Image (cartoon, rainbow, N blue to C red):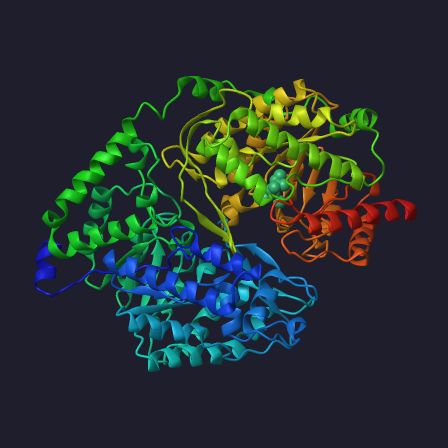
Amino acid sequence: MSVSQSAQQGAIMILTHNLGFPRIGAQRELKKALEAYWNEKSTAEQLLAAANSIQAANWKIQQQAGIDLIPVGDFSLYDHVLDMTMLLGAIPRRFDADYPKPLDLYFAMARGNAKQPAMEMTKWFNTNYHYIVPEFDADTEFKLASTKLFEEIKAAQACGITPKPVLVGPLSYLYLGKETIAGFDRLQLLPRLLPVYQQILQEMASLGVTWVQIDEPILTLDLDHGWAESFLPAYQTLATTGCKLMLATYFGSVTHHAATLATLPVAGLHLDLCRAPEQLDHFSGSDFTDKVLSLGIIDGRNIWRADLSAKLKTLLHTLSARKSPVWIAPSCSLLHCPVDLTQESQLDAEIRNWLAFSVQKLQEISTLARGLNQGQASISAELASADQAIQSRRESTRIHNPVVRQRVAALGASDYARSHSFTERQKAQRQRFSLPLLPTTTIGSFPQTSAIRQTRAAFKKGDISHLDYLAAMRAEIGDVIRKQEALELDVLVHGEPERGDMVEYFGEQLWGYAFTEHGWVQSYGSRCVKPPILYGDVHRPEAMTVEWLAYAQSLTKKPVKGMLTGPVTMLMWSFVRDDQPHAQTALQLALAIRDEVRDLEKAGIGMIQIDEPAFREGLPLRKAEWQDYLDWAVKAFRVASANVQDETQIHTHMCYSEFHDILPAIAALDADVITIETSRSRMELLDAFAKFSYPNEIGPGVYDIHSPRIPDAAEMLALLQKAAATIDPRHLWVNPDCGLKTRNWPETSAALEKMVNCAKNMRGIL
Ligand code: GLN
Ligand code: ZN
């Protein structure tokens, strides 16, 4: 019996749902509204009105795409985990002060203010999205503290859609937070937390909600003792509220928790079948017949058009064996995908035909459902069009470059290592640069003023000539060099005025990359990134940064650090091809960067920083797979960086402090200097470096650039003292946490002046 027959007989109706929709708006409307509010150019009412209209537009888009159950509560003004913290009333006590406007408290927690540093922010699993880390201690209390979600449910109902509210599940919420006092185990808070979840679910049931999506992505991780065991009792507590729970997992396989999952009293289970397709066989078995299976079959993390025929075949196979209900969905929230491909008018037609963004992905989902519900013939046009696109991509001559393939194949051991040990290089570098103890530097970018952005945009549009552009950028570089000299920084940078984005800038100059106009994805708060599309073999036709760096160096006697983006970050922050292993793509990128490093060195640039902020985020979610990733990632960095003289100093920079567990790999990069983010975590990370006896030099960030707050000198000095007590001061550098492009000049100058003074004071003490 075919599925279409069974659907006609009313047996199985395949439903579609979505796990989350991008919040930023197709034209980044949310970003604009937020920034206007923060800059006091608009009122809270205006911000909320803008947010509501984006949300309503998003619901409509999803409805028009044919999605049956539409997520509500996935929208957020800053971050959905922070929204959960507000909903659960888990406001850290340091924010107890009276905030006159309700939004002030919310944004104080997200961004910090004059009185309080922001809450910590960290990467959402292995994505480039950042969430605000909940803070817990033994006194943390929870209470139903916000009506936002309920208002949204009502608003959605008023728009005529069937809302499926989304919550971060209780275990994931606790797990993703952090204890603010040592020795406390946040899992102990679960009994206090569950009654509030019950209340939330009851309230939703009373609003007429049937299905609730409850996200427990931590099920894709290796969970420490106690966590996995807590799922059954927790979900037993939540089983009687009147709502049906769709337990959503994503970003990896949850087969290692299958036994637990089988016992949970939830009505549905969502699986990511793009990251872990093997799960399908596992979970379509008899243990899960009491649950709706939601098949995450369309990739929510990448932009390639789906092979609809292949997907349909998989679905038909599953359905032939399964009598219980099935839903179809994207693999995860579409938060990680750009909004709408139809916004792209400049993209090359051949490449465009290979792509699907959020809106198109939802259409793919409803097409598949229609094919299953009404028979394959009802979608024959869509299938033919997808088949044609898939074949065109497989055969396109624009993808394969034999020269690049040969270079990668010819790489040998000597290409992966510097000629001499760090100790020998350090001697040569000290001689060359004669820097003071605790040298001061920055991470690369300086404020990207609107004048800079306008000049770049005008140049891109062809409104100003090459020469005018060159003059304007040189003026910026000159200005930044003078400012750094006045601040008495020891190692200068050119400020990156020519770069809108650290990946896009390089991608634009490499073969194998394509660019979108509106392919934005939220990174944190109002910050969005536009990952380029890495579709083919990578080749660097000519130097990418040498002109700017040589000019900057010509203006000063102090060393100017060259600034490049590393192969792993280029890969992680691009939408990357799915037709060859990442390791292969990384080596192609590494060779392009290696060529640039050599050209910078030849041009007399003595320090070259190869940024790898995405190194940590590339780690697979499960430890068993780490080594394989680290092997190729380290190898790629070394291919990019090892081909230089001893006296050329290689720097690298990484953001986010969670790499205690991969220090051997960080050391294996063998960068002469690494600058890292440590200020938000109060230098905790340095202990790990010390314990590991990290051999090379380190610049722990002494202040948080993500916050507009000017750091306090005493606070900075305390951090530096802590650092000097932990790490040999002769190996220490002094720098901010990250690049300064998002800050303004008054903040930047004031902060750096304090930082330099702080380094000078510290030199006096040591
Ligand atoms: N060099 C880059 C900058 O300063 C590094 C950015 C990053 O680490 N994300 O902007
Ligand atoms: Zn950084």
86 relative to 445, above or below: below
| 445 and 616: which is toward the camera | 445
- Left or right, 179 with respect to 59, comes to right
Residue at the (37%, 23%) spot, across then down: 400
Q: Is residue 308 left or right of residue 10?
A: right
Q: Residue at x 66, y 51 (%)?
A: 705
Residue 255: quadrant of the picture: bottom left
Residue 699 in the image: state x and y as whole percent: 73, 43
Residue 129, image x and y in percent?
50, 52
Q: Residue at the location (34% across, 64% down)?
A: 56
User: Image quarter for residue 329?
Assistant: bottom left
Q: Is residue 491 left or right of residue 30?
A: right
Quadrant of the frame with the N terminus: bottom left
The answer to whether any part of residue 284 appears in the image is no
- Seen in the picture, residue 388 relative to 759 is either above or below; the reply is above
Q: Closest to the observer: 386 or 478?
A: 478
Q: Quadrant of ligand 2?
A: top right
Q: Position of residue 471 (x, y in %)?
A: 61, 28
- Residue 349 in percent (x, y) is at 29, 33
Where 412 falls versus 766 (above or below)? above
| Residue 523 in the figure: left or right of residue 280 | right
Q: Is residue 669 visible?
A: yes
In the image, is residue 515 above or below residue 223? above
